[in-house]
Image (tube, rainbow, N blue to C red):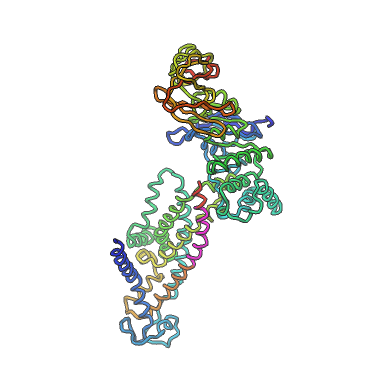
Amino acid sequence: MTQSEPIFRLEGVTHKYGDLTALDGIDFVAEDNSYIALLGPSGSGKTCLLRVIAGFEKPDTGRIWFQGRDITDLPAHERGIGFVFQNFALFPHLTIFENVAFGLRNGALKISAAEITDRVSSAIEMVGLSGMEDRSPDQISGGQKQRVALARSLVLQPKLVLLDEPLGALDANLRERMQTELRAIRERLDVTFLHVTGSETEALAMGDQVAVLDKGQIVQYGTPEAIYDSPALSDVALFLNRFNLFDGRLDGAIFEGPFGATPVSSVRANTSDVYAIRYDRTRIFDADVVDLPGPALPVRYLASEYLGSSIVFLFETEDRKTVEVDHHLSLGEPRDLTVGEKYTLSWDPAQAIVFGKETAR
Amino acid sequence: MESKVLKPILAVYVGLFILFLYGPFIVLGILSFQQGPEGGPQFPILSWSTYWYQHLFGLTPPSRIAPLPVGEALIRSLVLAFMTMVTSTVLGVMAAQAFRKRFRGSGIVFYLIVLGMMVPGVLTGLGTSLLANNVLGIDRHWWSTAFLAHVVYTFPFAFLVMLAILNRFDGSVEEASWSLGVSPIRTFRKVTFPLIFPGVLSAMLFAFTLSFDEFPRTLFASGRDQTLPLAIYGTFSVEIHPNIFAFGVMTTLFSFALLSVYGILMALSVRRAKKMAMQEDIA
């Protein structure tokens, strides 16, 4: 990945639907030639952001820059930004070949028939659909439609392609294959992908960079590792679905939670006091063990889920909150637990992340 | 079983419905083969003949019964129906397209358009003629005032048909086209129009047939030269001869021919629409 000039830049982009603020003053700079995953829960405004960049909707305030040019007032068809829809939006009355050729044939530039045939054929070959040129969109599978939609955009050689939950309509097997393929295709071309998704695993797996969107604002932007290891806000941690989060009260350097009072070393600014510890860093002990690595959280064992490479144990705290422990099987066989029995959970306090509404230190 | 009782009742009901629907036409069809020129609109048939069909085309020796003065009226009505069809469909598509986005006053505009098909036709016709004669001081013609009255009447039908079609239309294919660098006008021509074509056909059929046999509005608004419904009505007021029935059969056959064309075009484009629907299901 080469870091260079920003491919696009958002300056204070705000968009409202009536009283609802979908985008709330977004500032964002995207590097050229990279894979950016835009992660957000439903209703966070992520699709709206994509539509604003594509030019399907106009922001109420703010500017959008693309390749060093202000495109805020440019209509969608003059932007040269590709868009891949969740429902693919293929043209049902055209063959696969004509779908891919559509932009070349009907765009502002006049392109010779021979060149169109050449470029369309190589685009179809790139997505592995050679031989299907004459089929119509209702004669191919969901995964193939996805490839046609991608080829249709890429044949125009855009510098930026926006993908709106492109894998959402595919089944789990296909989704994983397409993840690998999308990355491979992007790396072959000099193009930036902005991939919107509601799935944290998809975002972390695919993005060179991940932007987390919440309530119309980008709350964190960084590499998947950085986001996974140190979420900037408790909402990000919650959304990553990898942390046990405990509400409590932070008083100076002491956090009081369901596990008692624990000293904390560093605190991140947040709207409430929250203590976070990753599922795979939470450990299980018998209820009467006293030699613990850190705080003691009394729990009752509920159930386990086998995930192939790891096992997830589900516990319940005294105030009926579910707590998860992720045990990776490469670390050895998991211990046998009895459903309904009491256990104690503990962890190394240095691995916890503490959010506090007092000023961060 | 409930269906043992219900089914025969429904069958009888449907039978009666079809009888009343086609009864008048069957009677008309039988009477058109009445003997001529002395036979009239009565049963029983004196003897079967095609006299009145020949009479219609001026192939019979001269008799006391004047040929039906419908030749020019028929041409006028066809031309008027065609003009109305094109205008109303274009307006209907454009208006329905405009209603895809909520705009200020869209509710009021909607009712103003739809009112055109609801106000009593005689009043519209009378109003149109008064407006032309007394206010604007222009002559009434079938191609001017009557044409306007027809468009006002048929435009709402075309509009409602297109509104229903566009309501179900998934706009993401248009956005996809824009994002491929294709201008909105070309997108409409290459993507939207082919996909809404079944609806456009229906709107055209509505506008044409409604205009072709429009009576109350045309009565006052058309001026001196009459359209077909007016010409036929004019012959009634003197004396009724079976040549009217022969003419009725001919126009009905023409309508069937029109419907067949519509049916064929529809079948061709419905195939596309199905593909569209399948694609939407996945989404």
Residue found 37% across the figure and 70% down from its top: B230
Give the side of residue B47 with respect to residue B93, left or right.
Answer: left
- Magenta span: chief secondary structure: helix
User: Residue B35: x percent and y percent?
Assistant: 37, 86
Residue found 58% across the figure and 34% down from its top: A37
Whether residue A263 is situated above or below residue B266 in the rendered picture: above
* Quadrant location, the N terminus of chain B: bottom left
Residue found at the far top of this picture: A252
Q: Nearer the viewer, residue B191 or A293?
A: A293
Q: Nearer the viewer, residue B235 or A282?
A: A282
User: Residue A285: x percent and y percent?
Assistant: 49, 20
Q: Quadrant of residue B47?
A: bottom left
Whether residue A236 is situated above or below residue B258 in the rendered picture: above
Q: Residue A68 in magenta?
A: no
User: Residue A326: x percent and y percent?
Assistant: 52, 27
Q: Quadrant of residue A350?
A: top right
Give the side of residue B8 with respect to residue A19, left or right.
Answer: left
The residue range painted magenta reads B261-277
User: Residue B203: x percent and y percent?
Assistant: 45, 59
Residue A69 seen: no
